[in-house]
Amino acid sequence: MTEAGSAATRVLDVAGLSARYGHIEALHPTDVRVEDRELVAILGPNGAGKSTLMRAIMGLVENAGTVRFRGRPLPRRAPEACAADGVVLVPEGRGIFGPMSVAENLELGAYLSGSKAEFERRQERVFSLFPRLKERLSQVAGSLSGGEQQMLAIGRALMSDPKILLLDEPSLGLAPRVVEEILGSLSALNREGLPILLVEQKAPLALKIAQRAYLLSVGRVIAEIDPRKVSSYDEIAHYYLS
Amino acid sequence: MTKSPTITFPDMTRRGLGALPWIAAAGVLAYAFFVGGYLTTVMSFALIYVVFVTGLNVFMGYAGQVSFGHNAFAALSGYTSAYLTTSHGFAPLPAFGAGLALALSCALIVGYPTLRLKGHYLAMATLAIGLIVYEVAVEWTSVTQGYMGISGIPPIGIAGYEITSERGQLAFLTVIVALATLVSWRIRESRFGRALSAVAGSEDAARALGISASRYKLSAFLASAAFAALAGSLFVHVVGFVSPEVYGLHMVVLAFTMLYVGGIGTIAGPFVGAVIISLLPEMFRQFKDYQDLAYGAALILLLIYAPRGLSTISSLFRRAAAKKAVVS
């Protein structure tokens, strides 16, 4: 699968993408691609540039290079245009709107859609994936547990009917059991055909659900990993420790 | 004690308490209307400030931005009204139209580049606008007559009918304030309002959902500038006089105090805050030399005991009730 993937099936094609914060280049020119129906993980230690890569793809940081979505170039400084094209990010730290209710958060996810019937359809899909959100609909989002907040963040992104979902470390600060639940839902979404690009620090968990993975270190892709060929995690641990 | 006492707190009582700030402020207004005299003047100023603060609330409370420069828009519209009605014989309404257009164009020119800034930078940029407009009002004497100011501005009037009595003006201002509050409420409950609070919550998250943060910030800036312009023009017609000091930095300080004491981001906040802050100095007038001291102390007490503003006082009672329930 690694070599295959013609331009026709390629969903996301990131070429020579670099990003900087002021004078510091946090991400050196990087190539990443996601094929149709694929779940790709971005692994790497703290400060490797994983979040920066995600923010650069969305155009949330100053960046250079090209990002193509199904062959069409995405604008480089307009996250709202990326979202309109169906490239949707669940940001690190969830970014839910704390003072608003769960229902209002979901409503904002569907901000770009006008149709009521479509809204209901998407909301049903979110509820079937995360039934707990339905129970908490009128609750203030800030009062949800960490895991529920993450479910809400993913649910909110799904409300915009993404064509590819980018997730920045959805396991952050969650209990192991909750992490498995969240990653399980992502895997289910992917099996339905949704391409996913997932940033994750917990490599073993991510490799369980990913079809392919990139390893990032100090702002560079240093390896591309086929999870089926990873016999031991020593090899990955080596990168983390070096 | 697993059951939350907030749920057992009777809903009717809570709603009643929620209306309390409204009722109190409206009561003072009605009292001023019947008593007349000096209190009517104080309340007229308070109502003009309600309009100004309501606008500021859209930008600061709903959209979560900071502006120290909205006095500029009040000044632009106020001076336009004053100049056109005194020197060119305009009626108040078309003069206000011109003032509003000027204020909005200025807000657009200033807002477009500065709203790309965040936090402190935006606040500093807006502070500069206020200072620049103040300087222009002082120096451009051929139009503004500098520190002397423009006097003899006609009172508010529509279609030849002028509202000259103080009670009439108060009634007119009450209608304007009711409309302004209604608009503010509609904004908050609208799609636009929710987008604003999303931007206030997290700009990046809002953008990642397809909400154009800069466009909504600019729209909120323009909307609040329009409120400020209306307040500026109302002022010159009610007082009949305008000078640069009217729209000085103290206007910003006063408006901020009103916004925070009333409750930022709430619908009743601007109304409650403006009325209270306008009345406080009057209540302490008998203290003579200690008036400012009493005023300052009252402000501190208000912000300690109602940190989210007086219009959220119902939640304060709810907390007290909750505490009592825990104790017993």
Image (tube, coloured by chain):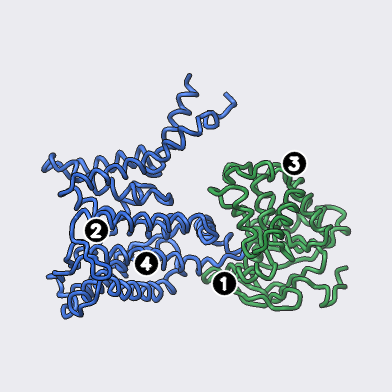
Chain colours: A green, B blue
Report which residue position mark 1 lands on.
A62
Residue at (24% x, 40% y) in the render: B297
On whether disc 4 and disc 2 are found on a single subunit, the reply is: yes
Q: Nearer the viewer, mark 2 or mark 3?
A: 2
Report which residue position mark 2 lands on.
B250
Residues packed near mark 3 inside 10 Å, few (<14), some (14 to 19) or many (20 plus): few
Q: Circles 1 and 4: CB distance less than 8 Å?
A: no
Residues packed near mark 4 inside 10 Å, few (<14), some (14 to 19) or many (20 plus): many
Q: Secondary structure at mark 3?
A: helix
Q: Nearer the viewer, residue B104 or B156?
A: B156
| Residue B304, percent from left and from top | 35, 39
Q: Amino acid at mark 4?
A: Ala
| Residue B309, percent from left and from top | 38, 44
**Is residue B15 placed above or below A113 in the rendered structure?**
above
What chain does badge 4 belong to? B
On whether disc 1 and disc 4 are found on a single subunit, the reply is: no
Whether residue A23 is visible, yes or no, is yes
Report which residue position mark 3 lands on.
A177
On whether disc 2 and disc 3 are found on a single subunit, the reply is: no
Q: Is residue B261 left or right of residue A95?
A: left
What chain does badge 1 belong to? A
Report which residue position mark 4 lands on.
B226
**Is residue B80 placed above or below B36 in the rendered structure?**
below
Q: What is the CA distance from the residue labelled 2 to the residue labelled 3?
A: 56 Å
Q: Is residue B173 left or right of residue A108?
A: left
Q: Secondary structure at mark 2?
A: helix
Whether residue B253 is visible, yes or no, is no
